[in-house]
Amino acid sequence: MMDRNQGTPTDERRSAHRDEQYFTASPASPDERRTIQVNLVGHQVPVQVSNGVFSANRLDLGTSVLLKKVPAPPQTGDFLDLGCGWGPIALSMGLLSPQARIYAVDINERALDLTRRNAESNGLGGIRAVLPDLLPADLTFDLIWSNPPIRVGKEALHELLMGYLPRLNPRGKAYLVVQRNLGADSLIPWLARSLGPDWTVGKFASAKGYRIIEAGRA
């Protein structure tokens, strides 16, 4: 008799496909693209989605909370969507600030291709979807919005955030949405300690079990 706690091969494949969105540059799951309609910052937008990419069938709740709660972005500047998936945050930045330069970063090449196509099909020419290694080393940002990949694990998440948050310009702000039961409240003091006394870090807003964390130079 099979132990109920022992995963079947099908379960293992499903788990592997779920993990692709976080760890895999080239997902092995079938690239079955679909067009859906999503509401982004008051605009009804058609977008392509696919398997092997975060939130492959809808706008996820955390991103929706972020987009509803964050302050309006500046009209110009260099913005970053960290962990872009199929591009809802970058697209929203582009809709709100069409003159801004928006960098959408992900390790998942399928996600980057979807973001590029979604930006092009919606006339958002300021979005550049790139692998992390292709960002100019001296590029700094006026704004970061992110639904960071919490499930990569604490160590990898901390390394990711400390690789990008220090690249904020002096007046820049970062807004991160993190589920409360996945460690949002413990992430705030960790960021404050790691970024140091020249930074302010705190809870900006809460909704539907999520925290939005704001970070910037003091």
Image (cartoon, rainbow, N blue to C red):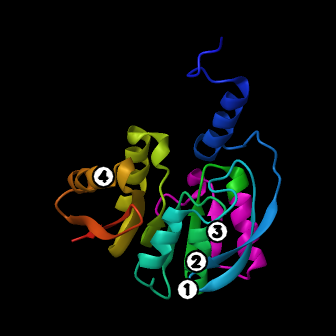
Tag on residue 96? 1
Q: In the figure, residue 125 lies in which quadrant?
A: bottom right
Would you say residue 41 is visible in this rendering? Answer: yes
**First in sequence: mark 2 vs mark 3:** 2
Mark 4: give few (<14), some (14-19) or many (20+) Cα within 10 Å: some
Q: Which residue is mark 4?
A: 187
Q: Nearer the viewer, mark 3 or mark 4?
A: 4
Kind of element beneath mark 1: helix
Residue 124 in view here: no
Q: Is residue 79 above or below residue 163?
A: below
Quarter holding residue 83: bottom right
Q: Nearer the viewer, mark 2 or mark 3?
A: 2
Three-letter amino acid code of the residue under disc 4: Leu
Give the mark nearest the N terminus, 1 or 3: 1
Query: Which of marks 1 and 4 precedes in the sequence?
Result: 1
Q: CA distance from mark 3 to mark 4?
A: 29 Å
Q: Percent position (x, y) of residue 157?
A: 42, 46
Within 10 Å of disc 1 (Cα), the crowding (few <14, some 14-19, many 20+) is some
Circle nearer the N terminus (4, 2) = 2
Q: Residue at x 39, y 61 (%)?
A: 209
Rendered location of residue 91, percent (x, y):
62, 75
| CB atoms of marks 3 and 4 within 8 Å | no
Q: Which residue is mark 2?
A: 92
Which residue is depicted at the point 58% across and 77% down?
Answer: 92
- What residue span does the magenta drawing correspond to? 112-139
Secondary structure at badge 2 equals: helix
Q: Is residue 75 magenta?
A: no
Q: Which sits in the foreground, 200 or 163?
A: 200
Q: Label 1 amino acid? A: Leu
Count of numbered marks: 4
Farthest front residue in view? 1
